[in-house]
Amino acid sequence: MNPFTELTPMLKSLRLSGMLDSLETRNRQALAEQLAPAEFLTLLVQDELARRDQARFARRLRMAAFHSTKTIEQFDFNAAASLNRALINDLLTCRFIHENAPVHIVGPVGTGKSHLAQAIGHQAVRQGHEVHFATQSQFFAALHRSRLSGVHGRRMKMLCRVRLLILDDFALKPIGSPQDDDLHEIIAQRYEKLPILITSNLAVDEWHEAFADNKLLGAATIDRLKHGAYTVTLDGPSHRTPRTGAPPMPVKAAQKSKS
């Protein structure tokens, strides 16, 4: 009798799909290399652990909601000659997460702020941290929807507790009520307990201008964001360059032109 016939449903019942997927391959390896039972079992357990690690990584990546798969390897450091590489390398270790320190990445449009923020976020995900990335517009739109659907408290709890919160394009648009209340509550809850990474086209000293309704609340929020923060400053022209030349002719149009 084939032992896999009995073993397969048991592995499925125990949700050991990593073992199940590699069972036949590992069995052939064990026979070919004359592995001891303990060695064979060790390989199967390693396969299961690898599958679970990959599944957890995929879940963290989905939760992060990055806009792209941009990593630090893809960042053009030649276009940012004045960038503090030592600071970037330190941030990529994610030590700031363990310090619960804020990080600011500021500079003109198109200089790579969002790319750097997502690259650091990717490193955090790889290290096992839960990350949430959103532009300021997405951030407040999601909070608005949560109010309308009756899950605002749950949304706030997630934003207050996620290990690393990344807020992109901060202060690009005015922050009115109740957005300023929500933001202040989130920053206050995370203050010195959990890190937040912020990108902005404006210098930190200009952020207060975004608080349209309550300047005092804005000042209290920004004061917490500034305390103990690491600041990365980017400069230079935009990396986003337009295409040159005419766009390629569609295949069908090109064929018609020949006739």
Image (spheres, rainbow, N blue to C red):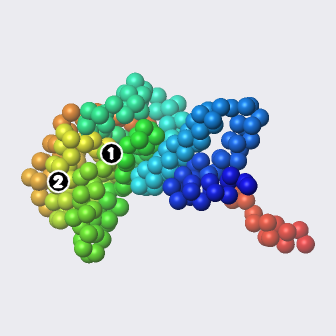
* 123 displayed left or right of 26: left
* Vertical arrangement, residue 182 with respect to residue 124, above or below: below
Between 57 and 39, the residue placed more toward the observer is 39
* Vertical arrangement, residue 101 with respect to residue 250, above or below: above
Query: Can residue 40 be spotted in the picture?
Result: yes
* 164 displayed left or right of 248: left
Residue 184's mark? 2
The residue located at (30%, 40%) in the rendering is 104
- Across and down, in percent, residue 256 comes to 84, 72
Q: Name the amino acid, label 1.
A: Leu
Q: Quadrant of the N terminus?
A: bottom right
Residue under label 1: 164
* 161 displayed left or right of 33: left
Residue 134's mark? none
- Across and down, in percent, residue 201 comes to 34, 47
* 18 displayed left or right of 125: right
Residue 146 is drawn in which quadrant?
Answer: bottom left
Q: Earlier in the sequence, mark 1 or mark 2?
A: 1
The residue located at (46%, 40%) in the rendering is 126
- Across and down, in percent, residue 251 comes to 79, 66
Q: Name the amino acid, label 2.
A: His
